[in-house]
Amino acid sequence: MNMETRAPEYKEGDRRVAGQPGIPAQRARQAVMGHNVRYVLGFSIAAVVIAFVVVYIAYFA
């Protein structure tokens, strides 16, 4: 591969070579850890379920 066909974000240090360890887990993860994402997702799903129950009761009860 020459430089023109490579993605611009490709770093030569990230290239895996046989016999050498891969990139560190922190860089390989490619995601932000923390920020309580699971709680936001859980509360959002609970809010949607409650909203559907309220709409169902309002229209069909």
Image (cartoon, rainbow, N blue to C red):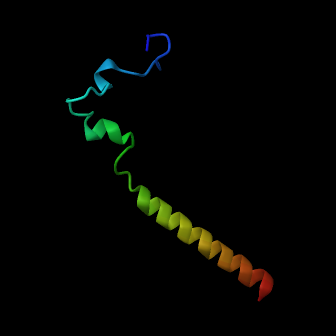
Q: In the displayed structure, would residue 8 be above or below residue 18?
A: above
Between 29 and 35, the residue placed more toward the observer is 29
Between 54 and 9, the residue placed more toward the observer is 9
Q: In the displayed structure, would residue 48 be above or below residue 20?
A: below
Left or right side of 26 for 55? right
Q: Who's the residue at 50% across and 15% down the image?
A: 5
Question: Residue 16 occupies which quadrant of the picture?
Answer: top left
Q: Residue furthest front?
A: 18
Q: Who's the residue at 37% across and 44% down the image?
A: 32
Q: The C terminus is located in which quarter?
A: bottom right
Q: Position of residue 29 (x, y in %)?
A: 35, 42
Q: The N terminus is located in which quarter?
A: top left
Q: In the displayed structure, would residue 57 be above or below residue 48?
A: below
Left or right side of 30 for 40? right
Left or right side of 22 for 39? right
Question: Residue 12 occupies which quadrant of the picture?
Answer: top left
Q: Position of residue 56 (x, y in %)?
A: 73, 80
Question: Residue 49 occupies which quadrant of the picture?
Answer: bottom right
Q: Position of residue 33 (x, y in %)?
A: 34, 48
Q: Position of residue 36 (x, y in %)?
A: 39, 56
Q: Who's the residue at 40% across and 22% down the image?
A: 10
